[in-house]
Image (tube, rainbow, N blue to C red):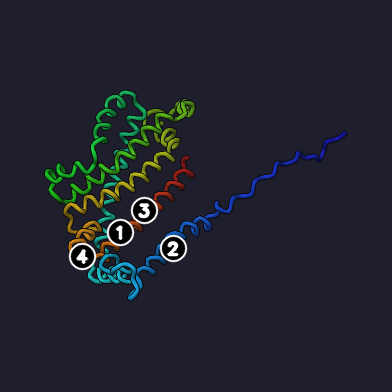
Amino acid sequence: MSTTGIRPTEAPTAAPSILARRGVRIALGAVLPVVLIIVWFAVTIPGAAVVAPYQFPSPQGVWQAAVDLAERGELGIFVAISVQRVLIGFVIAAVLGVALGGLVGLSRFWDATLSPSLEIIRAVPSLAWVPLLIVWFQIGEQSKIILIVIGAFFPIFTMVSISLHHVDPKLIELGRAYGFTGIRLFFTVQLPAVLPSVFGGLRLALVQAWLFLIAAELLGASMGLGFLLTRGQSNGRVDQIVLAIILLAVLGKLSDSLLALAQRWAVRRWG
């Protein structure tokens, strides 16, 4: 009996989940912020406010504070200064974290040499460096940038070093078979193999960079969103405090989203 033309029955494929659709995920992610904004409007309605304006301002009050600061030319400068500090500190931390994490993750010698000292430094709360940084660099830009670097360095270093310890040895042997050694082997085979983990460390480091930015600017800045928080507290301007918090949240989410886009591109390109 001829079997020509007979095809094996294909197993049915599962329908993609509706949650996999980007639009659905964006809509679901927007639900809670929208609800919070509605509640915010509800509890601060003029004449029927649940919370006193001096304790928690209305959305209109926060918007007006933003308009006033923008008209004075302060808002754009404060945002730009804070973004600049985070960007510089994060880039320096990323370079150092990948470089030292690569050394420790690939070399037993450097692992034995550097890891104990770096573990000791990591055990020190980062804010404990503040008094020493102020003594060394006063309250200028250097102390702020260094504090951000300290806060952002260790997530990158840890993820890179641990991930490289677990790279499949067969990939390394394959790379060597193609003649890759040293730096070329690292950038061609080993680093692409751990890209998801590296970007995971970068995204954690970016969060730390924003956290330590505020710690740095609260210490004695004359510009930036941390300074806006301090000035708002000193002047009793709760609207400026809430505005600074909202801006920090938006900038933090925006920068993380940009890094996530870079991650997807890098994984497609080299992963």
Answer yes or no: do the residues labelled 3 and 2 have beta carbons within 8 Å? no
- Mark 1–mark 3 Cα distance, whole angstroms, equals 15 Å
Question: What residue is shown with label 4?
Answer: 236
Q: Earlier in the sequence, mark 1 or mark 4?
A: 4
- Mark 1–mark 4 Cα distance, whole angstroms, equals 15 Å
Estimate how packed mark 1 is, as few (under 14), some (14 to 19) or many (20 or more) residues with alpha carbons within 10 Å: some
Estimate how packed mark 3 is, as few (under 14), some (14 to 19) or many (20 or more) residues with alpha carbons within 10 Å: some
Look at label 2 and name its amino acid.
Answer: Val
Look at label 3 and name its amino acid.
Answer: Ser
Question: What residue is shown with label 2?
Answer: 35
- Foreground: disc 1 or disc 2: 2
Outermost residue, bottom direction? 47
In the rendered image, which quarter contains the N terminus?
A: top right
In which quadrant of the rendered view does residue 108 lie?
top left
**23 lies left or right of 146:** right
Can residue 59 be seen from the camera position used here? no
Question: What residue is shown with label 1?
Answer: 245
- Mark 3–mark 2 Cα distance, whole angstroms, equals 24 Å
In the image, residue 81 sits, relative to residue 90, either above or below, namely: below
Asked which secondary structure carries label 1, the reply is helix
Nearer the observer, 165 or 233: 233
Asked which secondary structure carries label 4, the reply is loop
Asked which secondary structure carries label 3, the reply is helix
Look at label 1 and name its amino acid.
Answer: Ile
Rendered residue at 25%/71% (across/down)? 68
Nearer the observer, 97 or 14: 14
Q: Residue 166: x percent and y percent? A: 43, 29
- Mark 1–mark 2 Cα distance, whole angstroms, equals 18 Å
